[in-house]
Amino acid sequence: MAKIVIIGAGLTGLSAAYHLELAGYTDFKIFEKESSVGGLCRSVIQDGFTFDYTGHLLHISNPYFQELIQKFIGWDELNLIQRRSYVYSHQTYTNYPFQTNLYGLPTDVITECIVGFINRPRSKSNSNFYQWALANFGYGLTRHFFAPYQSKIFGYDIRKVTADWTGRFVPTTSIEQMIAGAISDQTDTVGYNANFFYPKTGGIFSWVNKFAKQIKTPINTNHCVQKINLKQKTISFTNGQSEKYEYLINTMPLDLCLKLVAPTSNLDFTTAQNKLICNSVINFNLGINRSDISDKHWIYFPEKEFPFYRLGFYHNFSPLLTPPSCSSIYGEFAYVNKGRNWQHQTLQLALQKTKALFQIAPDQILTEKIIPISHAYVIYNFWRAQNLPKLLNRLTQNQIYSCGRYGAWKYSSMQEAVLDGQTVISQILKKVEPQCHLKPLCPTMPTVMS
């Protein structure tokens, strides 16, 4: 038996384990269903090409997280990159974000976007994302970008989604910015991801793996949870093993966790587990025997002509992610409740469109890697907004602390995942061992940060 059990060795689970050890606490175990750690922050090396489980970029703003990165990796092992991202629509590449960069679009589109912004409805009842976009950006920007793009990336009706998730993810604009971005090509970058870090070698998993190696406690891989018994405080695994606990830290997707919790006389999560909705993503990757595919980092595709919502280029994150004189492309399309035939047909269309867009000949493709991701983007539906806090609180009352991107059912960055792990350990140690204290590192701002 371990007093504290951690389910999942993704970033939040690894962070929880690390911070327990940092506090000098060792009565815990960590279990991971896969054969390796990292969760979705993993990378695959195939035929000399490195592909992530979709593009993962390091956005570093918290001083404590900065210190961890400096301690475990070192700034010399990371590239500091100024974003080159674009939107492709109306057969034109415009700088991202769309709402501040209309230069190059057809005149009628620019006019519709600017006039729509000026005349946008000022209603305060922005109950769903579509209404929120109209109120904040107007009809033209909503029609040409926000509505089609978010419908693609969610794979879900945006009128059934709240705008609670927008925050730092959707930059604002002004009439001055729009006019300046319509009459000339703006070089200034806007948004939280204007600059980012990326490992020079090994893909995103390289830094996650270094983080995992700081943990002295063995990580039990190939342990898939089969059942959680709240009354007996026991976790059963599909390999026949079981583990008792006093406090459980869950970082697996919340909907899956609830399905595994055995109902009791006063606690049944059957309704909740079916109301938590997320989409799935097919991540396709191509290794190409050509060096001039693109000089961009990634491109957004709002139009229906293209089934994918984004394409990215790993060789522009680091030239060491491909063999010499080669390029690589990753793409993503999303869906909710679509069958295998639909997935297969959409994948074939996505590959076809990608090859045509960049004029890639069949003999130039050196390798192809398809990565299906069952839990990708959490859908911020209205049930979530009304019930998630109460649901997480009920779990906490039963000594289950569900945290991280999927455990807490939210959007979050790698930085936030690590900080979530630190936060949950602070909460639990106050109850388990009040004399234990985390030993925070002294926050130091690296000189490379802007």
Image: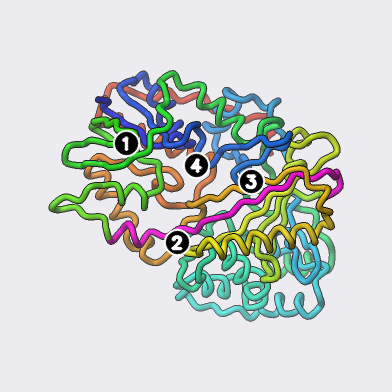
Q: Which of marks 3 and 4 is nearer the N terminus?
A: 3
Quick one: quadrant of the N terminus? top left
Give coordinates of residue 156: x percent, y percent: 51, 67
Quick one: quadrant of the C terminus? top right
Q: Is residue 177 left or right of residue 171?
A: right
Magenta-drawn segment: 271-293
User: Which residue is labeled 4 in the image?
Assistant: 416
What amino acid does circle 1 point to? Phe
Local packing at callout 4 (Cα closer than 10 Å; few below 14, some 14-19, many 20+) is some
Q: Which of marks 3 and 2 is nearer the N terminus?
A: 3
Give the mark toward the camera: 1 or 3.
Answer: 1
User: Which residue is labeled 2 in the image?
Assistant: 380
Looking at the rendered structure, the secondary structure element under dot 1 is strand
Going 50% across and 42% down the picture, which residue do you hit?
416
Q: Earlier in the sequence, mark 2 or mark 4?
A: 2
View extreme (left): residue:
265
Give the mark toward the camera: 2 or 4.
Answer: 2
Residue 55, numbered label: 3
Looking at the rendered structure, the secondary structure element under dot 2 is loop
* Badge 1 vs badge 3, beta-carbon distance below 8 Å: no
Q: Distance between the residues labelled 3 and 4?
A: 17 Å
Going 49% across and 24% down the picture, which residue do you hit?
441
**Depth order, front residue of 345/127:** 345
Q: Distance between the residues labelled 1 and 3?
A: 31 Å
Looking at the rendered structure, the secondary structure element under dot 3 is loop
Looking at the rendered structure, the secondary structure element under dot 4 is helix
Q: Distance between the residues labelled 2 and 1?
A: 30 Å
User: Which residue is labeled 1 in the image?
Assistant: 237
Going 70% across and 80% down the picture, which residue do you hit?
115
